[in-house]
Amino acid sequence: MPTVNVGLVGVGNCTSSLVQGVSHYADGEHTVGLTNPVCAGYAVADVRFTAAFDVDTRKTGLDLSDAIWAEPNNARRFAEVPHLGVPVVEGALGDGIGRSSADRITARGAATVEDVADHLRRTGTQVLLNFVPAGSQQASELYARAALAAGCAFVNCIPSVIARSTQWAARFEAAGLPLVGDDLKSQFGATLLHRALVDLLTANGVRLSSTYQLLGGGNMDFLNLQDAERMQTKKASKADGLLGAGAGTGTGTGGATGAGGSAPAVHVGADYIPFLADRKIAVIRVEGEGFGGTPLEVDLRLAVDDSPSGAGNALDAVRYAGFALAHGIAGVLDPVAARLMKAVPRPLTEPETEAGLRALLSR
């Protein structure tokens, strides 16, 4: 089986957990926590990291195996990673550093689109995985342009609007390249649990009136989300992920309305709590009306390591994208997005997602 050659944009906690995960699961002996030992025909050992970009001077110039441990990363260390021979090169800064995190990072990112594309070509990279900070629309678009120029599939793991943009979707379709996005779900996280609860209640006739999700964590993602404009993109994708397309727009036209009612009021909040490090605490509340209009309330609490929970889905996303690239499948991969992303271009039901994945893999 050929490899999937993956380039990484942003060597933060999620990248650390993904790189560790590939090292941990590559021998085929470890399976706990791994959703798909083989995905789209690729084993974990078939995933090969070929390029990495960052703008933090503490990481650039280091081998990827060393850069994943550099500050301010604080993801749990669960695997030993051998020397990979993949230097972290200076990337493009754009709008990648927010106000809240600016004093924590010495940034230098003078790379151009052509610089990035040239490095992708020289390293034989096939799939570019975007992990720049939330709210970095400009930086995400720069790397998407580089992927197009280099002939790479693009996986957008943050809430920036790439796969949901008809213009970007058309550009990847015309170039014959796969596109997956937007905003990676956790393998088992707050969005998955919240959506399952909403679906369960609405399927049983409950009319939802309001719901919220309050998150706390101590990694750079949570620090970055203290910028109001960056948090706004996260709120929108989170709301779309748990109630359906349009829920995050503030229009009250989300997908989960319950029996005989309009969409519920939705709130998503995030606090930076330094001592939690990469641990994420989620508090979820749903209010509604049951039989006879009687009140119903549900409160849930979830605690999970944030970055490893996302890495499992990132591992599947690059393997699906690699399969699509190898088989000439271009444009947005809707069933992959529906399975792995929060804010998708075209919402699909679970049966539609399963059927779409089967059709994709049969090509």
Image (cartoon, rainbow, N blue to C red):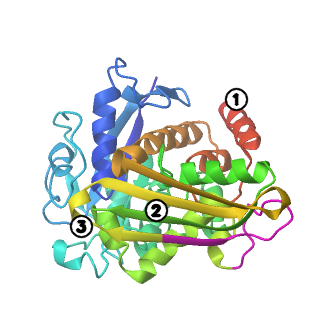
Say whether residue 125 is visible.
no
Give the quadrant of residue 226: bottom left
Q: Amino acid at mark 2?
A: Ile
What's the mark number on residue 36? none
Q: Label 2: how many residues lie within 10 Å, few (<14), some (14-19) or many (20+)?
A: many
What's the mark number on residue 55? 3
Label 2: element kind:
loop
Label 3: element kind:
loop
Q: Position of residue 23 (x, y in %)?
A: 28, 31
From which residue to which does the magenta span run?
251-268
Callout in the foreground (3, 2) = 2
On screen, 329 above or below 242? above
Q: Earlier in the sequence, mark 3 or mark 2?
A: 3
Residue at 15 percent across and 59 percent down: it is: 71
Label 1 and label 3: CA atoms lie apart by 40 Å
Residue at 18 percent across and 78 percent down: it is: 103
Q: Is residue 29 left or right of residue 330?
A: left
Residue carrying label 2 = 158
Residue carrying label 1 = 362
Q: Amino acid at mark 3?
A: Val
State whether the magenta stretch is mostly helix, strand or loop.
Answer: loop
Q: Position of residue 78 (x, y in %)?
A: 24, 36
